[in-house]
């Protein structure tokens, strides 16, 4: 984890000391930008900095215009960059290779030689933020005219690597307030959240070691052992991800920059929709605002709503990584959400009856949601057939 | 929320407590499923009075986590009566019998209580593993479950809300962020950071004191579970203190710092070859084993040799090497020779403890500037760590705490030990079981590939019908001499070229066998030609002297000690430190 490296420790100690000591807002902003650039260069290298730099310049200038064609082009370029770096090999080998294996193999090989071994650092995050900016500009929100503010939005180091995905309308004013004055309360809130984040990461990393040592013998575990394993998987991802978000939000808060929370006790959700209002909030709201709603949302009847949900969640799954199990996981949640939204309409009173039962017993809804989500994690982490076997073994002595 | 009435809450909590006590009484009284029983079947004789049976896979899985069922609590019953002597050694079970036994994750080795044969005496043998949950945890779990059951059965969510409101007055109106702000009211930033600084100073003082302490003084070697593979990273200071704790400057120090082979993987602590080497050499010498699995000369031995050279003017350094190998100073691939031990080299470099070696320094600086971002970042991390360690001694502090007080990293390597247990409570590895013929057959393709890569492919047939090394002597010498440019230092480094188990060599054809033997013997000559001391080891050892394809067993320890001690005496005499005959 980047935040748990010695380089970052030394970097943060120097940066925050200077940031708090300096009083001038302009100098503070310059310090923030320099630090973010140094962070990016260290962890991404020249090959990793170039795409974000070029894309940022393009998006900044496109964002200044009101030209819809330029705006569309900017969005297409951003999505194209993400698709090329992160998904081209996957798409070629799956789609082309599925139809014409030889051609697929040749193209995959070409792509491997052309593209860097790993995509640029945080490409998924900065592309999403740029797309959000351009789409909102299309809708008429004001542009970020100040290039330094835009740069801060593009390469803000606490959220650069793993989110949360920022919204510029909230972020820019927050940065402006922070560079003007850092309140001691913000610093302490940030420190506390940072500590919580690291504690969560410690727990998550231990769970990871236990899971990795146990997973090969999953089928040999006693029944309670398998349930403990699934529980561990579920808590591992929650603690890992929310811990990382806490650290990122805490670091931002230590500068006085407010980043909205990314997790809100997701395992207390009583239905799937509630879950997605609590889990990776920045991503789920992005998918809602920039995929689901533009596709039509729920404005064109149940069938379109269902389809739009499936597309949105498939993309949500694919965003996590170029692999079919992520897509399947997304579809799984898309179907689950559709059922959750529509089950009351099941005829012959069945839907209404089930709805009444769940209204009277929220704990039942909570149990169903929890099991649905936890089984979904097996699909997220393991191949589909293996995940199915693992779920079956949860009900077999 | 308006005035709360406590009475309903107390009534509900009381009901939950009553349910809890009832459930607790039932479970403890009836022992419902609180232990697991595994029948022992297909018992086979092994040797002497020792019999063996393989256990089902679920047993290993069940005891592999330290969650509920621990291997060290398992016991063997003979007709429902516990046998008296668990965790006995093989020799004891074999010779004495008397119901002695040992349970491992995959098999049980045991004897009957009266000397009869367990496979014929008609008795039932069962392994019992009790559920070990601290009563407080179990009570808390049952109480929580009871309360949840109460809430579900009577649909009493109101109870949960009232409990929360009672415990956190006004909490219904608060969100999590406000709760955070309340914590901020308690912690003022300036006193907090002053406190952090004071704590940092205090930890630095304690850490620096720990750096001068021989933390691992009660150990003979850094076995797996107190090594980087077990999440323990002894610092350069720890290693130096380990040497100082055992050897005074008046001794002739024999520092053994190689891979798992000189570490003695396959040898129980009581039969460790370096302990026998000490006996062979006598009190003028002091043998210290600082080997680590997968480590080689550049990572541990050479930095330590440099760091200790002024303190120990009479020192011989022993490592192992595969034939004709000139390892680089750094390697960044997992599973290769210096990962994950290069941090010792970096610490020595930052501390200025290393002797002059232009090739090494160039390699280190190149890695800091490497165009490969992973290499560059790893090296920079190591340097920053070494600098911070020099100032704050945080790793030394953690090593002392983790060894003596508590740990916080789960280790799959010791699943029958709670992960927070201090490492000092972990016993040295038991030797692995001798390999079965089945294992040799099963692993032969893998082992053959290894033999080819490490031995056979390093020599080629020559015109005389014999073999020659692939790399000419002068080229090889120039390459391997970069490890220690000073000839005087090279003369004090003994490289052991270790053989492989005859069980595997016997499977080679006759020509390949000659090739293998040539590779081992001739590479020792090549190292000597380069100025090192070197002997082949294990070339004529029998099968019983190996515990697996490459590691020596207890039985080999005396012979290893004898062979190596002869060479060490010769080296010491050559240096003029002794006048005895080798």
Image (cartoon, helix red, strand yellow):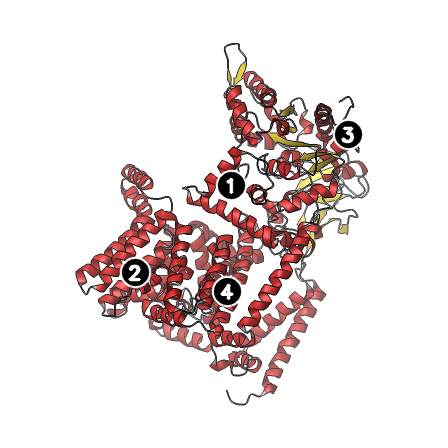
Tell me the CA gap for discs 3 and 2.
Answer: 72 Å
For the residues bearing labels 1 and 4, Cβ distance under 8 angstroms: no
* Left or right for B400, reference B190: right
Q: Determine whether B203 is above or below B296 in the image.
A: below
Q: Chain of mark 1?
A: B
Say what secondary structure mark 4 lies in. Answer: helix
Tell me the CA gap for discs 4 and 3.
Answer: 57 Å
Say what secondary structure mark 3 lies in. Answer: helix
Tell me the CA gap for discs 4 and 2.
Answer: 27 Å
Say what secondary structure mark 2 lies in. Answer: helix
Q: Are marks 4 and 3 on the same chain?
A: no
Q: Quadrant of the C terminus of chain A?
A: bottom right
Q: Are marks 3 and 2 on the same chain?
A: no
Q: Nearer the viewer, residue B335 or A2?
A: A2
Say what secondary structure mark 1 lies in. Answer: loop
What residue would you read off at disc 1?
B334
Q: Which mark is residue B280?
A: 3
Q: Nearer the viewer, mark 2 or mark 1?
A: 2
Q: Chain of mark 4?
A: A
Q: Chain of mark 2?
A: A
Count neighbours of disc 1 (C-alpha within 10 A) and say few if under 14, some if 14 to 19, many if 20 or more. few
Looking at the rendered structure, the number of numbered marks drawn on it comes to 4
What residue would you read off at disc 4?
A194
Count neighbours of disc 4 (C-alpha within 10 A) and say few if under 14, some if 14 to 19, many if 20 or more. many
What residue would you read off at disc 2?
A130
Count neighbours of disc 3 (C-alpha within 10 A) and say few if under 14, some if 14 to 19, many if 20 or more. some
Tell me the CA gap for discs 1 and 4.
Answer: 31 Å
Of labels 3 and 1, earlier in sequence is 3
Q: Nearer the viewer, residue A134 or A255?
A: A255
Q: Determine whether A317 is above or below B318 in the image.
A: below
Q: Residue at x 61, y 52 (%)?
A: B395
Residue B44 drawn at (x, y percent): 69, 37
């Amino acid at each position: 984890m980047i935040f748990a490296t010695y380089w970052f420790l030394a970097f943060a100690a120097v940066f925050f000391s200077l940031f708090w000591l300096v009083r001038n807002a302009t100098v503070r902003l310059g310090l923030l930008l320099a630090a973010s650039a140094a962070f990016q260069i260290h962890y991404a290298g020249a090959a990793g900095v170039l795409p974000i730099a070029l894309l940022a310049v393009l998006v900044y200038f496109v964002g200044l215009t009101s030209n819809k064609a330029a705006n569309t082009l900017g969005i297409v370029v951003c999505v194209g960059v993400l698709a090329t770096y992160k998904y081209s090999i996957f798409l070629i080998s799956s789609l082309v290779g599925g139809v014409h294996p030889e051609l697929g193999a040749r193209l995959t090989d070409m792509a491997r030689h052309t593209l860097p071994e790993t995509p640029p650092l945080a490409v998924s995050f900065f592309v999403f933020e740029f797309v959000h900016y351009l789409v909102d500009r299309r809708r008429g929100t004001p542009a970020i005219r100040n290039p330094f503010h835009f740069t801060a939005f593009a390469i803000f180091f606490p959220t650069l690597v793993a989110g949360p995905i920022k919204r510029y309308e909230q972020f820019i004013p927050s940065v402006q307030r922070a560079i003007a004055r850092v309140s001691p309360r913000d610093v302490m809130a940030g420190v506390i959240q940072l500590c919580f984040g690291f504690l969560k990461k410690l727990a998550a990393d231990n769970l990871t070691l236990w899971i990795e040592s146990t997973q090969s013998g999953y089928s040999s575990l006693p029944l309670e052992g398998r349930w403990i394993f699934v529980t561990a998987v579920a808590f591992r991802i929650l603690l890992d991800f929310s811990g990382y978000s806490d650290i990122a939000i805490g670091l931002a808060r230590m500068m006085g920059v407010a980043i909205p929370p990314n997790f809100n006790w997701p395992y207390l959700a009583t239905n799937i929709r509630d879950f997605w209002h609590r889990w990776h909030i920045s991503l789920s709201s992005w998918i809602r605002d920039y995929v689901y709603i533009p596709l039509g949302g729920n404005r064109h009847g149940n069938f379109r709503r269902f389809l739009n949900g499936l597309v949105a969640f498939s993309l949500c799954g694919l965003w996590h990584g170029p692999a079919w199990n992520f897509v399947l996981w997304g579809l799984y949640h898309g179907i689950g959400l559709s059922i959750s939204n529509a089950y009351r309409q099941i005829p012959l009173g069945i839907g209404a009856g089930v709805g009444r039962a769940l209204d009277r017993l929220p704990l039942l809804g909570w149990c169903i949601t929890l099991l649905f989500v936890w089984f979904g994690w097996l699909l997220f982490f393991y191949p589909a057939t293996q995940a199915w076997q693992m779920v079956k073994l949860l009900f077999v002595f | 929320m308006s005035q709360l009435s406590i009475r309903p809450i107390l009534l509900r909590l009381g009901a939950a407590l009553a349910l809890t006590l009832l459930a607790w009484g039932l479970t403890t009284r009836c022992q419902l499923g609180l232990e697991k029983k595994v029948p022992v079947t297909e018992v086979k004789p092994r040797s002497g009075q020792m019999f063996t049976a393989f256990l089902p896979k679920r047993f290993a899985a069940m005891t592999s986590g330290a969650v509920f069922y621990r291997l060290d609590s398992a016991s063997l019953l003979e007709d429902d009566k516990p046998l008296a002597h668990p965790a006995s050694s093989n020799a004891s079970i074999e010779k004495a019998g008397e119901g002695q036994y040992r349970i491992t994750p995959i098999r049980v080795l045991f004897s009957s209580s009266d000397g009869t044969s367990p496979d014929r005496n008609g008795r039932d043998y069962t392994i019992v593993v009790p559920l070990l949950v601290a009563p407080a945890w179990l009570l808390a779990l049952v109480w929580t479950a009871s309360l949840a059951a109460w809430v579900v059965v009577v649909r009493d969510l109101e109870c949960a809300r009232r409990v929360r409101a009672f415990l956190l007055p006004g909490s219904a109106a608060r969100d999590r962020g406000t709760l955070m702000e309340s914590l901020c009211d308690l912690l003022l930033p300036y006193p907090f950071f002053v406190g952090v600084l004071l704590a940092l100073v205090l930890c630095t003082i304690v850490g620096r004191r720990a750096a001068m302490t021989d933390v691992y003084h009660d150990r003979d070697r850094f076995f797996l579970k107190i090594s980087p593979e077990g999440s323990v990273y002894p610092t350069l200071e720890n290693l130096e203190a380990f040497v100082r704790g055992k050897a005074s400057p008046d001794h002739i120090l024999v520092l053994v710092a190689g891979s798992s082979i000189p570490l003695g993987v396959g040898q129980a602590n009581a039969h460790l070859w370096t302990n026998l080497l000490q006996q062979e050499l006598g009190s003028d010498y002091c043998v210290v084993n600082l080997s680590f699995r997968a480590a080689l000369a550049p990572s541990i031995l050479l930095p330590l040799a440099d760091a200790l050279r002024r303190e120990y003017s009479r020192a011989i350094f022993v490592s192992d090497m595969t034939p004709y190998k000139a390892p680089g100073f750094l390697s960044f691939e997992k599973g290769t020779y210096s990962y994950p031990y290069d941090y010792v080299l970096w610490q020595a470099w930052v501390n200025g403890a290393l002797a002059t070696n232009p090739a090494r320094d160039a390699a280190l600086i190149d890695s800091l500037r490497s165009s490969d971002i992973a290499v560059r970042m790893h090296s920079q991390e190591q340097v920053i760590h070494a600098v911070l360690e020099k100032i704050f001694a945080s790793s030394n502090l953690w090593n002392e705490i983790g060894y003596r007080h508590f740990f916080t990293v789960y280790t799959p390597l010791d699943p029958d030990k709670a992960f927070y247990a201090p490492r000092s409570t972990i016993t040295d590895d038991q030797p692995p079981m001798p390999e079965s013929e089945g294992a040799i057959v099963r692993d032969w393709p893998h082992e053959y590939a290894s033999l080819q890569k490490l031995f056979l492919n390093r020599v080629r047939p020559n015109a005389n019908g014999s073999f020659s090394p692939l790399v000419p002597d002068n080229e090889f010498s120039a390459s391997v001499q970069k490890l220690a440019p000073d000839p005087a230092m090279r003369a004090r480094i003994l490289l052991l070229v270790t053989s492989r188990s005859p069980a595997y060599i016997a499977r080679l054809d006759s020509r390949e066998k000659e090739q293998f033997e040539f590779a081992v013997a001739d590479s020792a000559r090549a190292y000597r030609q380069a100025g090192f001391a070197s002997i082949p080891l294990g070339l004529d050892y029998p099968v019983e002297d190996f515990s697996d394809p490459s590691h020596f067993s207890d039985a080999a320890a005396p012979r290893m000690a004898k062979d190596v001690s002869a060479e060490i005496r010769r080296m010491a005499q050559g240096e003029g430190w002794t006048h005895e005959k080798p």
